[in-house]
Image (spheres, rainbow, N blue to C red):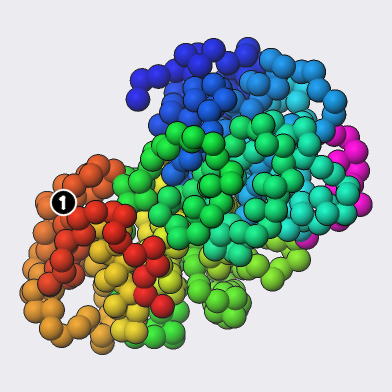
Amino acid sequence: MNAHFSEFLLPDLLMRGLASEGYETPTPVQEQVIPLAMDGVDLLVSAATGSGKTAAFLLPIMQRFLDVRAHDGGTRALILVPTRELARQIHHHFMRLGSFTRLTAGILTGGESKAHQVATLRRNPDILVATPGRLLEFLEGGRTDLNDLEILVLDEADRMLDMGFADDVLTIIRHSRPERQSMLFSATLHHRGLSRITEPLLREPRVLVINPVREQHPDIGHQFLLSDGLEHKQRQLLWLLQHETFEKALIFTNTRQGADALGRFLQGEQQRVAVLHGELEQRERNRVMGLLHSGRVNILIATDLAARGLDVPGVERVFNFDLPRSGDDYLHRTGRTGRAGEAGMALSLVASTEWNRMESITRYLNLSFETRAIEGLKAKFKGPTKRKGAAKSTAAGKAKAAGSKTETPKKKERLRDRKNIGKRREPSSAPGMEAGHAPLVKRNKGPSKVGG
Ligand code: AMP
């Protein structure tokens, strides 16, 4: 990737924004999306969070609006997103990249004051960043319209579908001017409901598969640790938090109650921890994010929904206290670390009841996992007994790592595998997981959801 932003012939004002952000070379998604988007082509893009996709759609939008100013004051670009956090992040990104321009953007999401948003709309921002529910309320209440819309972006479309926004999104598409340019970004293009939206949305789209779901994040290591249940997991996690070095850590639970309970436990153990879940009031969520950004807390416990789209610099560890429900969720969670080329580590605590799901995720994502064990906190559960090969290999070659043992049966092979994570390759088996799995040959044959 040797391209430079100057090749896109972006206006000077945007080049200054890029320079002040310190962006030197475009990321792969930017390299492919920006020229096509500037040509007005409809796009269907699979790109992960953390790939630089936000600038990939913001820059062409801003370029067009800088070149062609004349318009009557309606919204010219709409960016639809699943969550308020993502809306705020995109807005923030816009404010930074566009800081030398006079372009304007507004946010329209649930959980914020409507009066404030009505005032935002009155100022006729060039770009609206919105969640579907609140925008639809405004559209149906006649407070805004999309008659002047030139560009429509759907970001994290797979997650919008998971959150049940399909009908709202379809209604919004119907409200928007047919002569628009549309771009859809999704972590995966294999989501079951996606075609329902792409058909009415896109005209002869170019399909760009930038980061195929299983080939992203070469900079993340994946480990798992066997556990005997809730209390054992708590003690193991506490040990890890106390003994590992990291700037910030994210811990995922599958339920809000689980997040709260773990938060209470870790606070009781004097950890600097906060909890984020979907039921919190917006003001409280903002406060929690502020604590994490400022470093007052260095550990955030979150559910999948709450953490969607979070982009917090310095997250060096992601812990799955509960194993995620699907391989895609595993990717979304672990994508919070290893952002923009930094190295990260994802560690999953796996109880016997989660073992099958762990195997499915491993196969689906074709990931190499390293097994960990903490001296004095080893699980009685050793994995299914039929895995003789696994037992043998974990007994071999034990490497010591900061008081814990990283068991490395096939270290060389694994290191080679890890280097190759970003490339297409024959599936290799994870240590302790080699017994009897058919290799996954085609990515799109894999289940989009695995396990419970
Ligand atoms: P995104 O996938 O848009 O959420 O971006 C992920 C992170 O990468 C954000 O923190 C961006 O600020 C950063 N980023 C985006 N594009 C570039 C670039 N060309 N060079 C360096 N960092 C970038």
Q: Residue 97 appears in which quarter of the rendering?
A: top right
Q: Is residue 377 left or right of residue 233?
A: left
Q: Is residue 120 magenta?
A: yes
The N terminus - image quarter: top left
Q: Position of residue 406 (x, y in %)?
A: 23, 64
The C terminus - image quarter: bottom left
Q: Residue at x 20, y 83 (%)?
A: 384
Residue bearing mark 1: 426
Q: Residue 345 appears in which quarter of the rendering?
A: bottom left
Q: Is residue 228 above or below residue 42?
A: below
The residue nearer to you, when weighing 44 against 413, is: 44
Tag 1 secondary structure: loop
Q: Is residue 367 left or right of residue 47?
A: left
Q: Residue at x 57, y 33 (%)?
A: 57
The residue nearer to you, when weighing 225 against 152, is: 152
Q: How many marks do you count on the picture? A: 1
Q: Is residue 269 above or below residue 123?
A: below
Q: Is residue 146 visible?
A: yes
Q: Position of residue 221 (x, y in %)?
A: 31, 54
The residue nearer to you, when weighing 157 against 17, is: 157
Q: Residue 10 appears in which quarter of the rendering?
A: top right
Q: Is mark 1 within 8 Å of ligand 1?
A: no
Q: Is residue 227 visible?
A: no
Which range of residues does the magenta coloring cover?
A: 111-125
Q: Is residue 363 left or right of residue 268?
A: left
Q: Position of residue 247 (x, y in %)?
A: 49, 52
